[in-house]
Image (cartoon, rainbow, N blue to C red):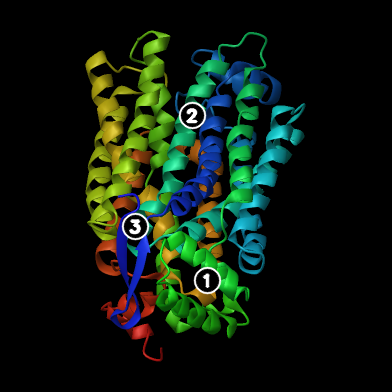
Amino acid sequence: MAGGGLLITGAGGTEFEAKITPILIISGIMAATGGLMFGYDIGVSGGVASMDPFLQKFFPTVYKRTKEKGLDSNYCKYDNQGLQLFTSSLYLAGLTATFSASYTTRKLGRRLTMLIAGCFFIIGVVLNAAAQDLAMLIIGRILLGCGVGFANQAVPIYLSEIAPTRIRGGLNILFQLNITIGILFASLVNYGTAKISGGWGWRLSLGLAGFPAALLTLGALFVVETPNSLIERGYLEEGMEVLRKIRGTDNIEPEFLELVEASRVAKEVKHPFRNLLQRKNRPPLIISVALQIFQQFTGMNAIMFYAPVIFSTLEFGSETTLYLTVIPGAVNIFSTVVSIYCVDKIGRRILLLEAGVQMLMFQIIVGVIIGIKVTDHSDDLSLGWGIFVVIMICMYVSAFAWSWGPLGWLIPSETFPLETRSAGQSVSVCVNLLFTFVMAQAFLSMLCHFKYRIFLFFSGWIFVMSLFVFFLLPETKNVPIEEMTERVWKQHWLWKRLMVDC
């Protein structure tokens, strides 16, 4: 409830008073627009890559294969390394930028790092929209990737640090919610620009990424810096004042003193990346790396790639096909909102475990139907089967959207101690972008060789990641960030063995 009070349990049972203040909500929303930019980039590339003028200009070989009947397998028409590089170059650049973003996040602050991300986004958008050749197009994507690296480093940490403990999960998931909104927005934009005569619609699609880029840049100019970052950099008075503003109370001294103590411990660490390998930091490091890898191997890319193919076989008109294409995107947004409501009430583990069962079941169902009905040179889905597959896809998307989508970002951002938080988040983002790059660069080739069996491949991974969550992932719900070591890692049946000397 807006303006309502919370009591946040701190070390030794101390209660930190906090209210849901307007400055907290505004700062959270503005920072989360970094996800809107990321989501738009994800959504726009697939749509643009299916536009004939775009393919004719940059990928004429792919254009020929999509137009000539029987020339190639349904599964292999888009198997082109150059086209895959158009998508994957963004993630490779983001991976590289993450290392610089870790430094700026720690030394210059979370807010300035978000501003740098916005500047990279804007320059990349201009180059993409004005691209005259493939080199210019790829350079633009690389700059967008640098923006993604900086934004994905700073935004989750920013949201986790300004949020009161009991709504930390929900506020942090605003980042993922904006990703889903960006994807849906890009899908709608692509549909509209594809109808533009003259062959320049793809430029407008790429250029409209400037809207979320401008939002992030302006937001970074007006949001407050986190108290954690200010205290970490020696601005104690400013840190106390910001903490008072975002908590909406004068009774902030207990929380302030805990942040000061955490900062003191953090400053004793001279090499945060090296410190990540110490025994006491291995549990959050292992959890974070595993979550990033597993998030990419849920098979979400496989499901979303097949959506246009499935819908095109239903023999609906173009308007109805648009609605069907938008449905999974709308389900994605709605289910992310469900996660915002549930994550701090029922916890992270329950959402991940339930989603594992749901995704496994519907992934297998879709794979079996595709395997039976879609062959190399024919699409044989009847209207009834087509509608059934649409429903199955939506059920799968909903499970991902309230679990592995947002929680893959939330959990790493809240589990590292302050002294290794920037380095830990950097590793998490780096691993995520590395495996996103691998999937983006290899997926169309995998699809060509695996065909419908790619769904079974991802189903096996979902089973493995669900076992990992059940046995190795502790619950972090309602635990203050600075108390994760004492209340989470030292209490876990396995990870406490690494905490003997802590």
Relative height, residue 471 to residue 435 (above, below)? below
Residue 312 seen in this snapshot? no
Nearer-the-camera pick, 372 or 329: 329
- Tell me the quarter of the picture where residue 487 sits: bottom left
- Where does label 2 land, which residue? 185
Q: Which residue is mark 1?
A: 240
Residues under numbered marks 1 and 3 in contact, where contact means CB atoms less than 8 Å apart: no
Q: Secondary structure at mark 3?
A: helix
Residue 224 visible somewhere in the drawing: yes
> Mark 1 or 3 closer to N-term?
3
Q: Which mark is residue 86?
A: none
Q: Quadrant of residue 194?
A: top right
User: Within 10 Å of the Cα at label 2, are there few (<14), some (14-19), or many (20+) other Cα atoms?
Assistant: some
Could you tell whether 320 is left or right of 260 in the image?
Answer: left
Give, as a three-letter code, the residue at label 3.
Answer: Ile
Depth check: 62 or 233 in front? 233
To which quarter of the image does residue 63 belong? top right
What residue is shown at x 37% (from left), y 47% (from top)? Answer: 298
Badge 3 density bin: few <14, some 14–19, many ≥20, Cα 10 Å: some
Please, is residue 68 above or below residue 406 in the view?
above
**Which residue lies under the disc numbered 3?**
167
Horizontal side of residue 478 vs 78, given as left or right: left
